[in-house]
Amino acid sequence: MAQTLDLGSRVELVSMDPHFDDISIALYSPEDSGPPCYQVHTYSRLPGVTERVAGVGHAMQVLGGIEQTSDGPLSFSCGHAHQLAVKRLFLEACKLPPEQPIEPRPLHIFDKKANATIAIDSLGQGLYEARATEQVRGVERRVATIARGLIRLGEMDEIADQPNQVRFGCGEAHDALIGLLLIRAPNVRAAMREAESMASRGVLSAPSSQE
Ligand SMILES: [Zn+2]
């Protein structure tokens, strides 16, 4: 099978897919004249690999609200890249067991450090606000920490004098993406470490080395 696809640059890598024979699976950003887009790809030719790649793409759509036209690349309707958030989206999509149903994550999370639930409200035009659902000691600091986590993980903008508010630079709502980033927002450093280890377990094999 010839590689006719122009994959562009590699955005993220899972060097050993835990749910498919430890294959390397990667996310690329095909360079096109259109808006930024992404393509899940593997050089593996194992039987069933096409379905696995399609499954990861599907999980990215459900979990992150990224869209796909037929079998084409994935992109956001706002036309922005949101590349850091997409890296996280890809990693989370690869981690999910393919046999389980995939649902978007809720816009709230139980924060162990605060011992309270922290919710994110969409205020429109890409603006979101974190808030505690109950007032317990120290929870406001955790709310601000989680807002900062979203800024780091999603390349979101901070809002002057509003430590609990964050905004997507595109000015559009991405609720599913916020729900996904929220899982890691309480501990950004652990999220960064995890991304490194998922990429470095082995190396992506070029097609020639798998003949
Ligand atoms: Zn956007």
Image: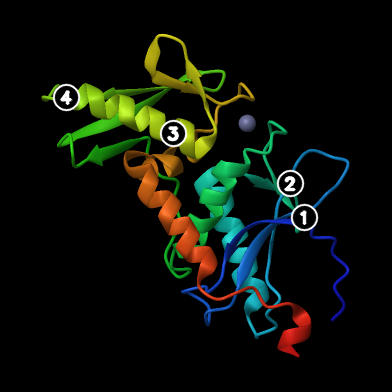
Tell me the residue at 63%/43% (across/down): 83
Going by the numbered disc 1, the residue's amino acid type is Gly
Marks 3 and 4 sit apart, C-alpha to C-alpha, by 21 Å
Above or below, 85 relative to 208: above
Q: Where on the picture, by quarter, is residue 95?
A: bottom left
Going by the numbered disc 4, the residue's amino acid type is Glu
Going by the numbered disc 2, the residue's amino acid type is Cys
Residue 133 in sight in this render: no
Q: Are marks 3 and 1 in contact (CB under 8 Å)?
A: no
Marks 3 and 1 sit apart, C-alpha to C-alpha, by 29 Å
Going by the numbered disc 3, the residue's amino acid type is Leu
Question: Few, some or many C-alpha atoms within 10 Å of disc 3 (few <14, some 14-19, many ≥20)?
Answer: many
Marks 2 and 1 sit apart, C-alpha to C-alpha, by 9 Å
The disc, 3 or 4, on the residue closer to the chain's N-terminal end is 4
Relative to residue 176, is residue 112 drawn left or right? left
Tell me the residue at 83%/49% (across/down): 31
Tell me, for residue 37, which label it has, or none: 2
Q: Do the residues labelled 2 and 1 touch (CB within 8 Å)?
A: yes
Front label number (3 vs 1):
3
Residue 63 location in percent, x, y?
50, 48
| Residue that badge 1 annotates | 72
Above or below, 3 relative to 192: below
Residue 165 in sight in this render: yes
| Residue that badge 4 annotates | 134
The residue closer to the viewer here, 99 or 178, is 178
Quadrant location, the N terminus: bottom right
Q: Determine whether the residue tagged by mark 3 lies in a helix, strand or loop.
A: helix
> In what quadrant does ligand 1 lie?
top right
Residue 168 location in percent, x, y?
56, 26
Q: Determine whether the residue tagged by mark 4 lies in a helix, strand or loop.
A: loop
Front label number (3 vs 4):
3
Tell me, for residue 150, which label it has, or none: 3
